[in-house]
Amino acid sequence: MNPKDTYRIPLAVPTFDKEMENAALNALHNERFVLGEDVYKFEEEFAKYVGAKYAVSTNSGTAALHLSLLALGIKSQEHVITTSFSFIATANAILHANATPVFSDINIKTYNIDPSKIRQSITKHTKVILPVHLYGYPCDMQQIMSIAKDAKVKVLEDACQAHGAEYNGLKVGTIGDVGCFSFYPSKNMTVCGDGGMIVTNNEEIARMVIKLRDCGRKTKYEHDIIGYTARLNTLNAAIGRIQLKRLNEWNEKRVRNALLYNKLLSDLDEIVLPLAPKKLVKPVYHLYVIRARNRDKLKEHLENNGIQCGVHYPLPIHLQPVYKKLFRFKGGEYPISELVSQTCLSLPMHPSLTKDDITYVCEKIHEFYEEAG
Ligand SMILES: Cc1ncc(COP(=O)(O)O)c(C=O)c1O
């Protein structure tokens, strides 16, 4: 069901318009369904947009992460240091690659992996650091790259929530050895279905992921590695090309919306607001996440007033039942991730939000805390 039908103000609203429909139909009528011309054009345009030498599309962000880890040469049981406070796919991709996720706690302000804690987790088994630019807010890449250099390990950026975000003048995803994006419908840009992209400046990695996503194919009938079927469909690439053209405009609107929320909510002691953009850190607000006193009751109040909210994420990955079972986590291992998961609340955030929508949401938040006394 379209959330527009049920909420006055939905959490996210993906755009699908006539231009995208025409591009999709054109691709279906005139190109190969798989690895058609639009796939290669989308990759070329995405690489140019982020400022990377290569971009290789996949059928999901999870596949992008999985294949990137394989291309980085990760071996069975080697360690990948990552955050527990992310969507589960970040850690799943590590397990798909037969490696071991080693979680590290987050910074209480950015909600991203805390570089000082990464250093403590490095051992001789560490092969890759996998930071996640959560909610579209760039990680402290200067520190992360410096730790990786000292430890001689690779960096794979999970930029699945951060299309177009910048750190120190560079688009996230292009700072480490490899970067991965997701085009799932709720993201800042979508292919109106599942899809992903791997970006890198390393030719060897690019060649390897091209092969891995296409059954390990060396030539049409010759396969020299065990690969996967992880290609992006042509019609999705055709839609992605149009979405990419709009991305900057949409991101600007997201930033404008976030700044308005910050302004209208700045007087409330009961909530903690997301960080504003800085000179060298340019977030794209995939999600606008506050930390709120009495989170669950506030969520209920907003939803009763037609405002859809989300919780990203109510459980840090290490406390997901499957991870608890696999790694015997009990709770208390990553206290900041656990604290944030209990208090975070995602308010509606998308480019088509109006000033009136945001004003209404903020009024309802004020009303809640006034009534609570
Ligand atoms: C941080 C993060 N990593 C990985 C993924 C996985 O992407 P996908 O859903 O396209 O497989 C997502 C998206 O859902 C995500 O938000």
Image (spheres, helix red, strand yellow):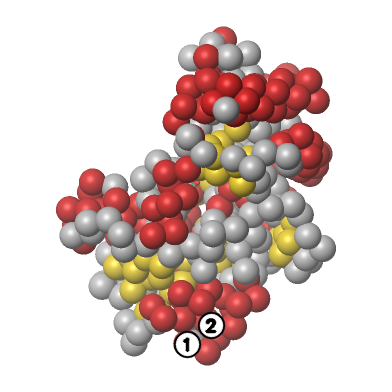
In the depicted view, which residue is nearer to us: 130 or 41? 130
Looking at the image, which is closer to me, 278 or 70?
278
Secondary element under disc 1, as helix, strand or loop, is helix
Q: Quadrant of residue 69?
A: bottom left
Q: Position of residue 279 (x, y in %)?
A: 82, 63
Circles 1 and 2, Cβ within 8 Å, touching? The answer is yes
Q: Quadrant of residue 245?
A: top right
Residue type, mark 2 in image: Ile
> Can you identify the residue that label 1 sits on?
151
Question: Image height check: is 338 above or below 279?
Answer: above
Q: Which quadrant is home to the C terminus?
A: top right
Please rate how many residues cluster around mark 1, counting C-alpha atoms within 10 Å: few if below 14, some from 14 to 19, many from 20.
Answer: some
Q: Position of residue 153 (x, y in %)?
A: 47, 81
Give the vertical position of 129 relative to 284 (above or below): below
Return the residue found at the far top.
Answer: 5
Q: Residue at x 65, y 66 (%)?
A: 174
Q: Does dot 2 land on a helix, a strand or a loop?
A: helix
Q: Is residue 8 above or below residue 39?
A: above
Look at mark 2 in the image and give the residue it sits on: 147
Residue at 73% in and 31% down: 351
Rendered image: mark on residue 51: none
